[in-house]
Image: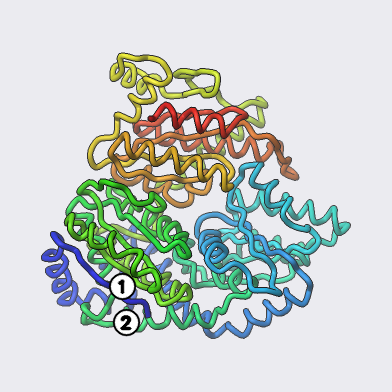
Amino acid sequence: MSKTAYFIGEIEKTVEKTKLEFQAQSIVPRLWKRDHTIWRSEENHKNSILNRLGWLESVELMQKNVGTLRSFSDEVRKAGFTHAVVLGMGGSSLCPDVCRCTFGSTKGYPELLVLDSTNPSSVTRIEKSISLATTLFIVASKSGGTTETNMFYRYFYDRVGQTKKGDAGGNFIAITDSGTQMEAEAKEKKFRRIFINPSDIGGRYSALSYFGLVPMAVSGMDIDRILKSAQSIIGASRNQELKDNPAAMLGIALGEAWKAGRDKLTFISSKQIETFAYWVEQLVAESTGKEGKGIIPIEGEGELQLYSADRMFVLLRLAKDAAAFAALTKRLRGEGHPVVELILDDEYELGGEFFRWEFATAMAAVVMHINPFDEPNVKESKDNTVRVIEGFKKTGSLPKQELLAENAELEFYAEPAYEDILIAGSSDHSLAGLFRAHLNQCEPGDYAAILAYLDQNEKNARLLQELRKAVGARSKCATTLGFGPRYLHSTGQLHKGGPSKGVFMILTADEAVDNKIPGELFTFGVLKQAQAIGDYQSLAGRSLPIIRIHLGKEIQAGLEHLHSLVK
């Protein structure tokens, strides 16, 4: 089991007080007994809690099915598949993507890829990197009706069918709940395999279920080691003596840090395991970001020269990197920030971290008095996207937005009421002046969110990270970077349901390519634009500070110019 070290400074007394109160109230035993009242006692919360606690027994179930997973992995390898592509969103894709980045694929097993973007360039990049005939497509959707996942499935089922003359089913498997449309479709199309996941496991708590374990097995990971690591933290998580319960104590620390105004949960990680933080980002943001409350995960920001007093830090590192983290640990402690160090002997201890963070997030929600298992605001952007798409089907065009300013590289869009605020806040009404006025909306305790509907390739990621650093340096606020539409299934709930502390910029661009979706009147390019517009409408409808920045066809030039405006 990974080691934990705490330096929690100003919140130490409140953490100790809550620990004693939770022991007196038997919170941990009640959680394991599925007592929904530790979170919320209202009837309208009861079912959404009780129907989402299957993750507590997920590891035990998967251990019983290790033989099935191994057998299927051997079947895939012997069938000659060279690639395996997960088609999913949010909880169905993030754990497999963490595993792809952290472990890669074992020699002799299919190379694991993940598609969770409707950007046509992303779809095309995946397609160009595989051989359709020798690729296994893992269609992963809890509800069986996730729009993006269904569009990915339709597209690649059609493409494989063209390559194999209609015999495409053998290249597909499904992971879904019982009784979904996806299960029915998989049976009709004669998919190679259907894995039925327990329906009481929510998407963001599904890493240690079939949604995570099937891709792990297919790519040749040692799933026994992952589950063994998880089992060790599960045993400790049953301890009623909370000082011996590392997951519960982490959750209490998260909740008390939030209550103390340190709501920016900042991750700094060893390079090899750094992507684990964006799985945690979804778990924490979607579980706690509601009712005007929320812990705001900050991952991938990098080390800064100055941190404000709204931060709590998690240093997630491999034991071998102790020397590299020593100076940072000393500095953060010296500045008085709460710091939790999670020290892993090797990357397979992430199995335990998946469960630790699930349990800790549930415990933090007890402190915050919220239901961690619903996502009441996610549907808004989906509904807006549907309206935009339906309008496109009727008119052949997407809705026009209010142009704020433009130059040769960029177009800025904002709502009229917000435009008035920006004009009033700047003596320079040029595009550059108005953009700086937008960044000036960041006040102490806020965060700046860059939401990029761009392909998540290496060049775009690097340029966006440079932009992010410049925005943080100018605004003096914490920053987040999300790729759209992926973030809609991650931090999107927090943006809309959490505290009104976000200053948002949605980035869009013209795509060099586009892909038709079989059976639909719209393309992936139209769907992506509709999702960006839909989320813009949802955020603007809350009178949150938001602009949309269109980069045109030259994405690199547009990002570099935007960076120069910040500086």
Q: Residue 392, image x and y in percent?
A: 63, 30
Secondary structure of residue under mark 1 = helix
Residue 39 is at least partly visible in this image? no
Left or right: residue 517 compared with residue 374: right
The residue depicted at 51 percent of the width and 23 percent of the height is 411
Identify residue type, mark 1. Answer: Ala
Residue 35 is at least partly visible in this image? yes
The residue depicted at 43 percent of the width and 36 percent of the height is 538
Judge the density around disc 2: few (<14), some (14-19), many (≥20) Cα neighbours within 10 Å. Answer: some
Asked if the residue under mark 1 is in contact with the one under mark 2, i.e. CB atoms within 8 Å, the reply is yes
**Which one is in front, 557 or 118?**
557
**Which one is in front, 203 or 504?**
504
Q: Provide the residue designation for mark 2.
A: 236
Q: Residue 25, image x and y in percent?
A: 18, 74
Residues at marks 2 and 1, CA–CA distance in whole angstroms:
8 Å
Judge the density around disc 1: few (<14), some (14-19), many (≥20) Cα neighbours within 10 Å. Answer: many
Dividing the picture into quadrants, the one containing residue 9 is bottom left
Left or right: residue 121 compared with residue 444: right
Q: Residue 509 shows which numbered tag? A: none
Left or right: residue 514 compared with residue 59: right
In the displayed structure, 346 sits above or below 204; it is: below
Identify residue type, mark 2. Answer: Ala
**Which one is in front, 383 or 357?**
357
Q: Provide the residue designation for mark 1.
A: 247
The extreme right residue here reads 165
Looking at the image, tell me whether mark 2 or mark 1 is earlier in sequence order. 2
Dividing the picture into quadrants, the one containing residue 417 is top left
**Which one is in front, 15 or 324?**
324
Quadrant occupied by the C terminus: top left
Q: Residue 493, image x and y in percent?
A: 40, 48
The residue depicted at 60 percent of the width and 61 percent of the height is 140
